[in-house]
Amino acid sequence: QVQLVQSGAEVKNPGSSVKVSCKTSGGTFNIYAINWVRQAPGQGLEWMGGIIPMYGTSSYAQQFQGRVTITADESTTTAYMELSSLRSEDTAIYYCAREGKYCSGSSCPCGYWGQGTPVTVSS
Amino acid sequence: EIVLTQSPGTLSLSPGERATLSCRTSQRIFSSYLAWYQQKPGQAPRLLIYGTSTRAAGIPDRFSGSGSGTDFTLTISSLEPEDFAVYYCQKYGDSPPKTFGQGTKVELK
């Protein structure tokens, strides 16, 4: 049974950075992508980027390029998302979502989700 | 970059009615790479449909997906009280970004 457990809520000042963790258990960690998806209050889902731990390379949505870094630690089966230069518009719930179920070739939907980490950016 | 546009924004229906949700992509996508998710307030999204038309484990058969090319549909044949939620389509696959549509809210009429 695959489970994703995220770190707790964060309150940050504008201009600072936040790093959210996503500890996974069950399944095979390193061969399936872990994605990060955020949801601002009352808004929809926004894909930020993802990583396949075995390759260590990340891909990012254009609107986050230069501000987001997604990494993975195979030894602890934990993925991380760091967002810098925070502004009030970054206030959102941040979800990690792992692939690895219902795959067509190497492409899979997000079958497993973490519980979400609220991040509040406020002075 | 492929944009996913869902319609309508809100669907007001009663239990027992049929819900038809649309997801239109700005470019053709492989039908293998279109998914639908359900999200209820305070919860993480849940995968309903993948590969355009295959239900994930445990999803009731009142949920069905169809479509190809640029037009995709999620149908709920007869709404149950627990189906009132927000639904998102997503394009996945090997080419990022793995974009979501903006969502359709199915609300109680």
Image (cartoon, coloured by chain):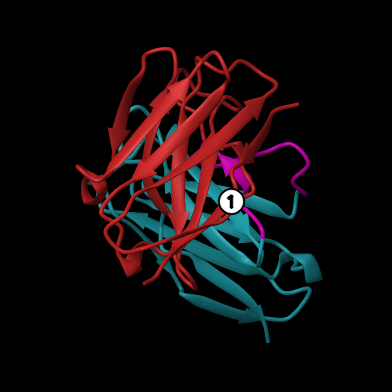
Chain colours: A red, B cyan
Compared to residue B78, the image places residue B9 above or below, namely: below
**Is residue A41 shown to the viewer in this render?**
yes
Is B100 contained in the magenta span? no
Task: Using the rendered view, name the quadrant where residue B11 is placed.
Answer: bottom right
Between A46 and A73, which is closer to the camera in this rendering?
A73
The residue tagged 1 is: A116
In what element is the residue under mark 1?
A: loop
Amino acid carrying label 1: it is Gly
Q: Residue furthest bottom?
A: B109
Task: Using the rendered view, name the quadrant where residue A59 is placed.
Answer: top left
Question: What is the chain identity of the residue bearing mark 1?
Answer: A
| Percent of width and height locating residue B34 | 46, 42
Residue visible at 56% across and 52% down? Answer: A117
Between A46 and B13, which is closer to the camera in this rendering?
A46
Highlighted magenta segment, given as a residue range: B43-60
Residue visible at 73% across and 81% down? Answer: B14
Between A85 and B65, which is closer to the camera in this rendering?
A85
Taking the image as shown, residue B107 lies to the left or right of residue A1, namely: left
What secondary structure prevails in the magenta region? loop
